[in-house]
Amino acid sequence: MPQQPFDRSRTLAAALLVCLLGTPSLAQIGPATALLEQSSWKALDAGQHESAATAFREAIAIDPKNPRLHVGAAVAAYALRRDAEAQAAVDRALALDPARRDARELQGRLLYRGGDLNGAI
């Protein structure tokens, strides 16, 4: 069987999902948002970053105080190299839940990619 070509964007999304502790628990959100969130994380895992970004925006419109959705939107934006959008979503997630480790880690990745090594540390 021929080896699949290296897909950097899919590998990046998979690595981010692992770093961000996988798919978040859906037990604490409403059913309308739960399906959107679940499909959003699956789209990210499949490398469908634009679809994931759209679905996270829709879920945020329904449940704007859910920090997991903002982290998801940040991951999608990060994968699409929309760093300003990703940073804004991380900031919203951290404003809602300052203890979110996944948001802090993504914030560090954004700072590192932007060249702020001290800030990333």
Image: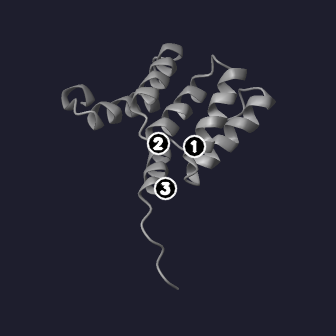
Q: Residue at x 34, y 36 (%)?
A: 109
In this rendering, position of residue 119 left or right of residue 54 = left
Horizontal side of residue 19 vs 31, given as left or right: left
Q: Is residue 30 above or below residue 3?
A: above
- Placement of the C terminus among the 4 image quadrants: top left
Where is residue 82 shown, x and y percent of the image? 43, 35
Could you say whether the residue bearing mark 2 is in a helix, strand or loop?
loop
The picture quadrant where one finds residue 108 is top left
Mark drawn on residue 50: 1
Which residue type does callout 3 highlight? Arg
* Residue closer to the observer: 41 or 115: 115
At label 1, counting other C-alpha atoms closer than 10 Å, the crowd grade (few under 14, some 14-19, many 20 or more) is some
Which three-letter amino acid code belongs to the residue tagged 1?
Glu
Q: Residues within 10 Å of mark 2 (few under 14, many from 20)?
A: some
Q: Considering only order in the chain, which callout, 2 or 1, is on the residue closer to the N terminus? A: 1
Q: Amino acid at mark 2?
A: Leu
Q: Classify residue 51 as left or right of residue 85.
A: right
Q: How is the image coloured?
A: one colour
Which residue is situated farthest in the top direction here?
95
Residue occupied by mark 2: 80
What is the spatial separation of the Cα atoms under label 3 and label 1, in whole angstroms?
12 Å
Res. 101 in view? yes
User: Which of the 4 quarters of the picture holds residue 54?
Assistant: top right
Q: Which residue is mark 3?
A: 10
Q: Does residue 77 sit above or below 85 in this rendering? A: below
| Residue 23 appears anywhere in the view | no
Real-space Cα separation, disc 1 to disc 2, in angstroms: 7 Å
Q: Residue at x 52, y 30 (%)?
A: 71
